[in-house]
Image (cartoon, helix red, strand yellow):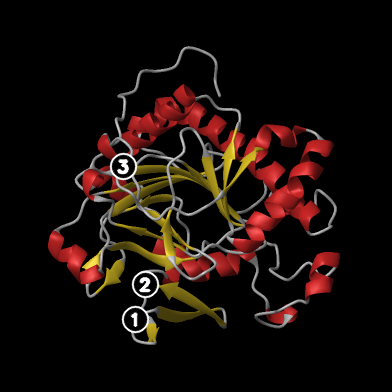
Amino acid sequence: MPGTTLPPVPHYVPAPPTREDLDWADLVVIDISKARTPEGRAQLAPQVRDAMHTTGFLYVINHGMTQSQTDRIFDIGDVAFSQVSEEDKRQHAAMIAEDGSKIGYKLRQLWTIDNGVRDQHEQYALHRTIFGQQEHPQALQLFLPEMRAFAEHNHYNVLFPILQMLALGMELPEDAFVKLHGFDAVGDTHARWIKYHPRTQEDELKTKNVWLKGHTDTGSVTILWSQPVSALQIMSPDGKWRWVRHLDNALMLSGGFYKGTIHRVVQPPADQRDRPRLGAYYFALADDDVKLVPFVESPVLQRVGIVRKCADEDAPTMREWRRGRVMAYGLKETTRKDDVVEEQEIVKGIILKHYN
């Protein structure tokens, strides 16, 4: 992160961690500082492989940013929402429905959650290069160098080591996945801040307290910077929804080339219910021209068997899959299965499920 004198920014004060006794998910914790050497990555790879194979979710600690640096990233993220007018947000809105891109603002009430209830969260996504790919609101101009450094830190110091260990776990060359995620390549990998706002009791009843329907993410790896308002749940291997506990200055990783974690956002526990929930993220997607076919050369896949969702020649590129997913979520009618549990839609001929 930049070491020069930094511009002042209002401090964002989140709610304290919940004191409620929730059903917490039991997640693996990885010390990523050990992944700085080939020997360390080889040592951690089986642990990362097993975590991503079973739950698709893990914690990362010792990632190279201090608590004060992380706090500042949340301070800057809140500027995108609290110091930018609604008109300015609309002027910098993402082309979600038009082009399947989340770069820019997702405004509140864009998506339908359930029973006609619209969402109450807003997002601001910045292309990872920060400069040259999009225009930013005036309120964020002073902070763009720090946002660029944040994107680079996520990409090179967190994403790349994780991709290397995932490749080792599949007995592939260490750079097999790294080569598909170029920082300067054409693609939609981005940093994003999301702010959830409390909803009315009527909306909570209509949606059974679900703020964001259960789903898997579109890309390769999602990096979530831990924050104290509990609302994120993952579906455990036994089929039960469990809460993800806040861990100070930790990262949470989901998705991956192994198991795409089914996760959702629900109403926070009672002692945090009246507070907003601000999150910082880094969404890593393969380069746009990457065709989404299995790594058939992996000895691991050869041993367990390869299950295809479609023929290789019909497989979408990352750009096609990303556009189809983004343009569908919350904007199109879905077909319910078993009345309540699953909702299905077709993206590029592939059945996509939402868990509501």
Specify the quadrant of the image occupied by residue 85: top left
Between 114 and 259, the residue placed more toward the observer is 259
Residue 321: x, y in percent?
Answer: 57, 69
Residue that badge 1 annotates? 340
Q: Is residue 24 above or below residue 144?
A: below
User: Which residue is denoted by mark 2 in the rendering?
Assistant: 356
Q: Which residue appears farthest toward the bottom when viewing the image?
A: 338
Which comes before the other along the chain, label 3 or label 2?
3
Residue kind at label 3, given as amino acid type: Thr
The residue tagged 3 is 18
Q: Which of 350 and 339 is in front in this view?
A: 339
Instruction: Check disc 2: other Cα within 10 Å, few if <14, some if 14-19, many if 20+.
Output: some
Q: Given the image, on which type of amino acid does mark 1 rest? A: Val
How many angstroms separate mark 3 from mark 2 (CA)? 24 Å
Query: What is the distance, in whole Å, between disc 1 and disc 3 at their CAs?
Result: 29 Å
Three-letter code, disc 2: Asn
Q: Can you say which quadrant of the picture contains the C terminus?
A: bottom left
